[in-house]
Amino acid sequence: MKSALLPLMLLALLVPACAEKHYSKLNGDEVSFYYKDPEAQEVLFVSSRDNYKLLAAREIKNHLWEVSIPVEKGFAYFYVVDGVITLPDCPFTENDDFGSRNCLYKIDM
């Protein structure tokens, strides 16, 4: 019995470690972006859709930050976490004009 519980206990410990740090959800004509960081004190969302204005995310629970924006077409984006430009793992990226990369949001993804 104890040997059967050990794999389940290990799996329970590993599942939270595999949870996504960054994801988005489309709701009608709005998209919500979520960013998880247990150390973050401030998370800003920056995108090409509004000429790279800093948009404050709000912490909704357990170090999970959310920002929602209207969406009409795809755009480039990144985060500024505690003053540091941060590019999370994202399925689509592009090179920017400053030698770095941006995430790409595509409506049809």
Image (cartoon, grey):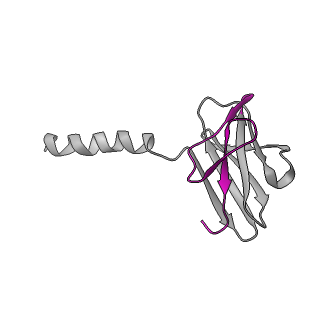
Residue at the (43%, 39%) spot, across then down: 17
Front in this rendered view, residue 56 or 76? 76
Q: Which quarter of the figure has residue 49?
A: bottom right
- Residue 96 position, x and y percent, is 72, 43
- Residue 75 position, x and y percent, is 74, 56
Residue at the (63%, 61%) spot, across then down: 25
Front in this rendered view, residue 80 or 15? 80
Is 92 one of the magenta-colored residues? yes
Residue at the (21%, 43%) spot, across then down: 5
76 left or right of 11 in image? right
The tally of labels here is: 0
Q: Which quarter of the figure has residue 62?
A: top right
- Residue 39 position, x and y percent, is 61, 29
16 left or right of 3 in image? right
Looking at the image, residue 97 lies above or below residue 26: above
- Residue 1 position, x and y percent, is 13, 45
* Quadrant (top left, top right, bottom left, bottom right) of the C terminus: bottom right
Is 64 one of the magenta-colored residues? no
Q: Which quarter of the figure has residue 106?
A: bottom right
42 left or right of 54 in image? left
Looking at the image, residue 29 lies above or below residue 66: below
The magenta span reads 81-109
Residue at the (28%, 41%) spot, across then down: 9
